[in-house]
Image: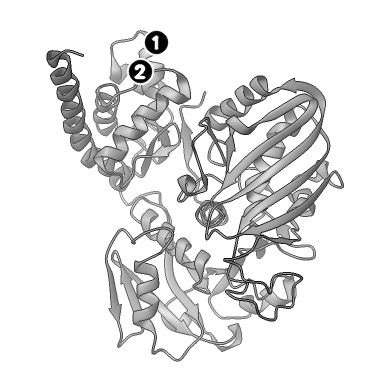
Amino acid sequence: MSQENLEACFKQWQDNEALAEQMIPLLGDLYRRFNVVPSIYGRSLINRSMVRILKNHRWVRKAEGVELSVEDTFPLVRAMIALNLGPAHIDIGKLAVAFKRSGETDITAFLTRELAEIVGGHVEGGMGGEPKDVVLYGFGRIGRLLARIMIEKAGGGNLLRLRAIVVRGDGDDLEKRASLLRRDSVHGPFEGSITVDQENSALIVNGNYIKIIYASSPAEIDYTVHGIDNAIVVDNTGKWRDEAGLGQHLECKGVAKVLLTAPGKGDLKNIVYGVNHADINDSDRIISAASCTTNAIVPLLKVLNDEYGVSQGHVETVHSYTNDQNLIDNFHSGDRRGRAAALNMVLTETGAAKAVAKALPELEGKLTGNAIRVPTPNVSMAILNLTLNTASDAERMNDFLRTASLHSSLQKQIDYVDSCEVVSSDFVGNRHSGIVDGQATIVTDKQAVVYVWYDNEFGYSCQVVRILQHMSNVRFSYFPTR
């Protein structure tokens, strides 16, 4: 490449940097003022750095085979500000690609047509209604990630407000609790400010005042004393998983509903958002968000069953170790789980295969499953070994799954990657419940093996928050609609 071309290449990058930097405050305005959540092919643009915005644009080439730059999206973002939009999730990347392909030149006319339902729909004060109080009962791995996500979303009309966190102890550990939220060995530092209010036993996180309540059981708590009422309690302790145990929360003053971050037992509804969240009724007071593995595989199983039909299959989960296992060899009530988690692969059982039927009844009795706990702290893999009703091949199935990840109603649950170099740590922080590894797909006639990565902590927590939003009647329109 000539020196002239080298300079031109660098100049183009600098120009794109400048546009991305100009775009950041406009994206923030869309989010905080209009409650519009902007993305590029499912990749969020909220609170993203200039470089991350440019990388999200670059990703479109892999997704659609179309080059997309900030020169294409910046005019759309600027035009959206003037349209006084109502609340919505808007995929700016898809709109920009559609505009390029349309051959039109009038951006405002294009957007007015595509976003007609929400043009002029902005209402001062957000989405309307009072914010829903949320309480985290437990503050472990999932609890802290739920806190991060809810605090991140609090500025954009989310209508969920984290009001309190319930933990065991005597009130002498606030600094340690704050430190665990501030620093995470897997997910990195918290993006924001955390202040400890020792006198009032509270944390002030990005302006959100969060009461820390110390209790050893729900029976000890009256939430109304802290100004909390009609709240949803998210139980992430896993201590109770049936209606009788979780019902203790409903006996507390100020509690309206309970959401469990583990598979529910008995007749509790196990919800995988995107698949069966419409089964949640206003009268349901206790809901389960199922397991991380169930959330990872059910969306994929649904689209595969809808397209090909699944006659039977086996799910093998290669799962990172969890806090339930021992750090070194010691007594454990579960089979094999007493052996050192960081030194061994541990064969164990998983209820995910059976749990699939609670979200997808049509697959009841068709799946078996096992799990292998491995010495990694986060990101797991599910291997779906399926017998289909309709024959296919790897290329056709990958095309189908890739399209599902981009354009189906499950695009927030299903992601797709086509690289022979990715490893588990590359998916830390991925907000989808499962990511298809296209390079690993094997299909021979009616036999298919599909490999699905998932961040068993963060991706699952994102699913839990989506259920929380649904339970709180937080509804967004999605654009483009086609």
Q: Is residue 159 visible?
A: yes
Judge left or right: residue 400 versus residue 24. right
Residue sitting farthest toward the front = 343
Question: Of the residues tagged 1 and 2, which is closer to the observer?
Answer: 1
Report x, y in % for residue 329.
64, 77
Q: Mark 1: which amino acid?
A: Ser
Are the residues tagged 1 and 2 within 8 Å (C-beta)? Answer: yes
Q: Mark 2: which amino acid?
A: Phe
Q: Is residue 290 visible?
A: no
Q: Secondary structure at mark 1?
A: helix
Q: How many numbered circles are shown?
A: 2
Q: Nearer the viewer, residue 481 or 171?
A: 171
Q: Nearer the viewer, residue 102 or 82?
A: 102
Q: Quadrant of residue 21?
A: top left
- Relative to 95, does residue 248 appear above or below in the rendering? below
Question: Would you name the residue on which mark 2 appears?
Answer: 110
- Relative to 340, does residue 479 appear above or below in the rendering? above
Judge left or right: residue 170 versus residue 372. left
Report x, y in % for residue 341.
61, 67
- C-alpha separation, residue under disc 1 versus residue under disc 2: 9 Å
Q: Secondary structure at mark 2?
A: helix
Report x, y in % for residue 410.
59, 37
Report x, y in % for residue 438.
59, 31
The N terminus - image quarter:
top left
Question: Would you name the residue on which mark 1 appears?
Answer: 102
**Nearest to N terminus: mark 1 or mark 2:** 1
